[in-house]
Image (spheres, rainbow, N blue to C red):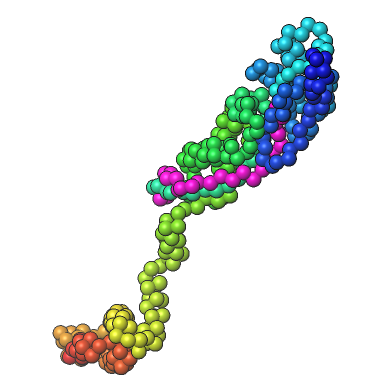
Amino acid sequence: MALMDFIKKQFIDVIHWTEEADGLLAYRYPMADMEIQNGAQLTVRESQMAVFVNEGQIADVFGPGLYKLTTQTLPLLTNLKNWDKLFASPFKSDVYFFSTRLQLDRKWGTPTPITIRDKDFGAVRMRAFGIYSFRIADPRVFHKEVSGTREAYTVSDLDGQLRNSVIAALTNAFGASGTAFLDMAGNQGLLADNVKKQMEPMFAKMGLALDNLVVESVSLPEEIQKMLDTRIGMNMIGDMQRYTQYQTANAIPIAAANEGGGLAAMGANLAVGVGIGNQMASSMLGNMNQQPPAGGAAPAAMGNGGGGGGGGAPAAGGVDDIMATLEKLHGLVGKGILSQQEFDTKKAELLKKLG
């Protein structure tokens, strides 16, 4: 009966693993009650490593290759089992396979903006996004610190830990760099290198190697971005006085075209017209007072009977300028840009200069 049980007992003579699911980092080879046959064949493919664990202790680690399992190929396991000669009987041991290929296109990003000091804005709420890639570098450390005795361990099991660690390192790197936010677009590569350097020791503690890290974009929250766009626009305008004059000139035909747009539109047009009229009248009066009379002579004194026998009468050029100004102002009244009261006030001031 004992002989029959021995015959019926299953033995493993070939051990290998092919990754059937994407994102699998560690896989425990199914053993159940089966035992590994002396001289069994172990196949470890490229991008894999295999670890033998005996009674909770990591024994031998195998890289890519084809192995015949004997005391020569399992020296640490042989020592743990106290085999003093070639073993001839089957043995039990947990076998774990680890995928060492690159895990690509792992995404990271700030779920909420992070507040950082900035030399231009004082403080800035920044968002950043990017990708990184990593691989298992030391399966012994990864098994002890991360995957343990689980039947399978996947990339998604690590995502949260690694992503949050990247964000923490990004915050530190940005604060230590001293680079203004407006200069960050041209320094994203340097920022990524600094973050990678900070992350590598943490990855190594888990038996991982951080292969690459990319900062794809650094941005501000939408409401802050609008304020920055406004500031950039004002800097591009430069001379605000000339810009205001340009905007005023463009508003004249718009105001005239909207005169029939109802009571609200008429009120708005009137307000625009009054402001425009005042600006134009002040400009024309200023230009008139600064213009010398014909012939290049000094302007005659008005109203106080200055010297030269002028008796206070203005020069002919000055009268013509005043009359031309009155005609222009009267035209603005006809267009509804100036009110009659405003025109009368300006007219009285101008006629007073005629003495």
Per the picture, the main secondary structure of the magenta-coloured stretch is: strand
Residue ID at (48%, 40%): 171
Q: Is residue 212 above or below residue 71?
A: below
Q: Position of residue 352 (x, y in %)?
A: 18, 89
Query: Going 45% across and 57% down the picture, which residue do you hit?
Result: 222
Q: Nearer the viewer, residue 104 or 211?
A: 104
**The C terminus appears in which quarter of the rendering?**
bottom left
Q: Is residue 12 left or right of residue 135?
A: right
In the rendered image, residue 108, in percent from the top left (x then y), is placed at 56, 44
Residue ID at (69%, 17%): 54
- Where, by quadrant of the figure, is residue 300 drawn? bottom left
Please state which of residues 193 and 129 is positioned toward the viewer in this rendering: 129
Residue that sits furthest to the top in the current view: 84
Residue at position x 35%, y 86% in the image: 261
- Which residue is at the front of the view, 97 or 116? 97
Q: Which residues are magenta?
A: 95-121
Q: As drawn, is 260 to the left or to the right of 352?
A: right
| Residue 52 in the image, given as x and y percentages of width and height | 72, 21
Residue 277 found in image quarter: bottom left
Q: Is residue 172 left or right of residue 10?
A: left
Is residue 294 in view from this perspective?
no
Q: Is 108 one of the magenta-colored residues?
A: yes
